Image (tube, rainbow, N blue to C red):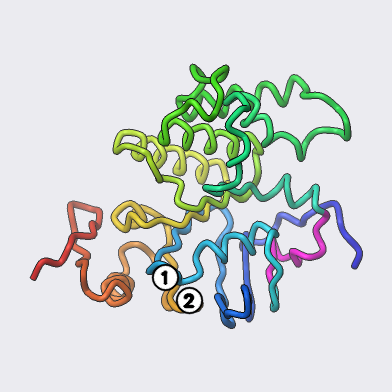
Amino acid sequence: MTKINTIPNESRLALETRRLTVDRDHVVVLNDLNLTISKGSWCALIGPNGAGKSTLLQVLAGILPFQGEVQIFSQPLQQLSTRIRAQRIAWLDQSSVQSADDLTAYDVVMLGRIPHQAWLGGPSAADQAAVKRALTLTHAWEWRDRALGTLSGGEKQRVLLARLLAVEADILLMDEPLANLDPPHQADWLRLVRELVAQGKTVVSVLHEVTLALYADELIIIADGHVRYAGKRDDPALHREIEYVFEHRITIQPLGDRWVALPNLA
């Protein structure tokens, strides 16, 4: 298959899947899944454990084989060169740097610049500026010389987020980006996502924090390997579907101009 080195960027859709099916260890994790995600928006993927959310992100990142179709800005994912895919799609995974504990925070974030560097070429001034900018945005610049393994869970998470930002990709895929973050830094993350979307970026995040997911432009409920429902955050039908997939153990309630997920203790 011929690999291409450019992506048409005029499509209103950033991501689209058609009849997407993924088999892992002879178990069908995603089955005939269809979805669309608009360019320049924040989409939150929610659903019960084991629904296939993380698998879906890995497919969109191009790191899992699949059957069906996946399109990036209307271009088939399989036709993108590895380099272009790495430049245009950034991926935050909880386990992606487990072997990097001896690297400094600065060097970990610099890994996000590899897709932009020439073969055997060192970091450029643009790379260094991107790394400083990303570490500053995530309030992690002061740890730049510390080894990743010496950081707390929340500090490490902010460094990993900085690595994602350093790619300067059009599409940012985040699997549980709020893990280990305290409430103030969760609020920082929400503000950052809004800034990214305002810049035209597309953010797709897997979140277990349903209340925070209800800040997204659109939510997609994944259950049993399918898209059960997709809707805007203020869609009453979406709220009913969220309550259903979580076995009515939570209830969605209005709070001012927002919505919150509360435990159902009845």
Q: Quadrant of the C terminus?
A: bottom left
User: In x, y percent, where is residue 179?
Assistant: 40, 45
Ranked by sequence position, the earlier of labels 2 and 1 is 1
Q: Quadrant of the N terminus?
A: bottom right
User: In x, y percent, where is residue 203?
Assistant: 53, 51
| Disc ID at residue 227 | 2
Above or below, 33 relative to 202: below
Rate crowding at label 2 as few (under 14), some (14 to 19) or many (20 or more) other CA atoms within 10 Å.
many
User: In x, y percent, where is residue 110?
Assistant: 67, 29
Q: Quadrant of residue 36?
A: bottom right
| Disc ID at residue 221 | 1
The residue shown at (62%, 39%) is 99
Outermost residue, left side = 266
Could you tell whether 58 is left or right of 264 in the image?
A: right
Closer to the camera in the image, 251 or 99? 99
Asked whether disc 2 touches disc 1, contact meaning CB atoms under 8 Å apart, the reply is yes
Outermost residue, right side = 2
The residue shown at (32%, 37%) is 182
| Disc ID at residue 210 | none
Amino acid type indicated by mark 1: Ile
Q: Secondary structure at mark 1?
A: strand
User: In x, y percent, where is residue 45?
Assistant: 45, 62
Amino acid type indicated by mark 2: Val
Above or below, 187 relative to 204: above
Could you tell whether 198 is left or right of 18 in the image?
A: left
Could you tell whether 69 is left or right of 241 in the image?
A: right
Closer to the camera in the image, 47 or 9? 47
Q: Secondary structure at mark 2?
A: strand
Rate crowding at label 1 as few (under 14), some (14 to 19) or many (20 or more) other CA atoms within 10 Å.
many
How far apart are the two marked residues, 2 and 1, measured between alpha carbons? Answer: 6 Å
The residue shown at (70%, 77%) is 67
Q: Look at the image and give the residue range highlighted in magenta.
A: 70-81
